[in-house]
Image: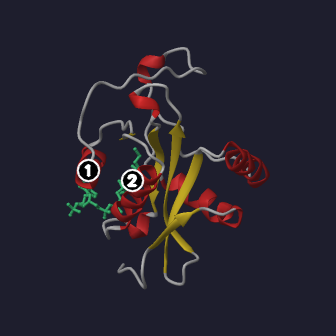
Amino acid sequence: MAVVGAVVCRQAQRSDLTALLTLIPQIERDSCSDGAQVPALARAEAIFDQMVRHGNVCIFVATVADGTDIAATCTMTIAPSLSHGGRPSATIETVVVAAQRRGQGIGKQLLTYAFAYAREAGCYKVQLITRGRPDQVGFYRSVGFSWEGIGFKVYLDRDDSSHGG
Ligand SMILES: CC(C)(COP(=O)(O)OP(=O)(O)OC[C@H]1O[C@@H](n2cnc3c(N)ncnc32)[C@H](O)[C@@H]1OP(=O)(O)O)[C@@H](O)C(=O)NCCC(=O)NCCS
């Protein structure tokens, strides 16, 4: 399906939550990840309000058509730091493009927007951990990430963290 109208990237608003709760479950499911699970709307609203109060967490969306059709999202956390001369760093999570909108450049536009936001906030880097599926690696390389270091995770609500993702 071709994109109809311009892609516009912006911060999510509270009124976008219903659409986001439909979009986020379109993240690729695999046996080791519960990333596709979303909370009920009331809890999502409370979490959103908490993010706004926190100030360092942003949900970004890419819209198409008349600007209300949310085609993609990602979440960026900006962490203040005492290293790197006191410059913050950014972490991106929950990257999802609507299944019928993939392969149209929307994900790349959204992450380019997120990078610009991080740069404006003075961040010295943007980082992201992916499970390393070839499609994810191809996408993240294309938008400018390079493979560096080794990522570690501990899943705090699992007995066996060796299967984390
Ligand atoms: C991965 C994902 C975010 C990519 O978004 P997208 O909008 O389809 O990607 P784009 O059309 O913007 O592609 C941008 C670039 O990535 C590359 N790319 C996209 N999908 C790819 C794939 N499956 N394999 C290899 N490269 C890919 C494109 O070729 C393009 O490269 P180019 O600009 O050099 O030509 C999207 O497919 C998605 O939401 N997948 C499911 C959710 C998911 O897995 N999220 C990641 C969680 S870590």
**Which image quarter is the C terminus in?**
top left
Residue at 74% across, 55% down: 41
Which one is in front, 23 or 149?
149
State the residue position of label 2: 115
Q: Which amino acid does the dot numbered 1 rest on?
A: Gly
User: Which mark is nearer the camera, 1 or 2?
Assistant: 2
Residue type for callout 2: Phe
Residue under label 1: 144
Q: Is residue 41 above or below residue 56?
A: below
The N terminus - image quarter: bottom left
Q: Residue at x 39, y 22 (%)?
A: 152
Residue at point 30%, 66% (across, down): 103
Q: Which quarter of the picture shows residue 89?
A: top left
> As displayed, is residue 102 above or below residue 7?
above
x then y, percent, for residue 129:
38, 36
In the visual, does 103 lie left or right of 118? Answer: left
* Labels 1 and 2 touching (C-beta < 8 A): yes
Q: Quadrant of ligand 1?
A: bottom left
Q: Is residue 135 rendered to the left or right of residue 61? A: left
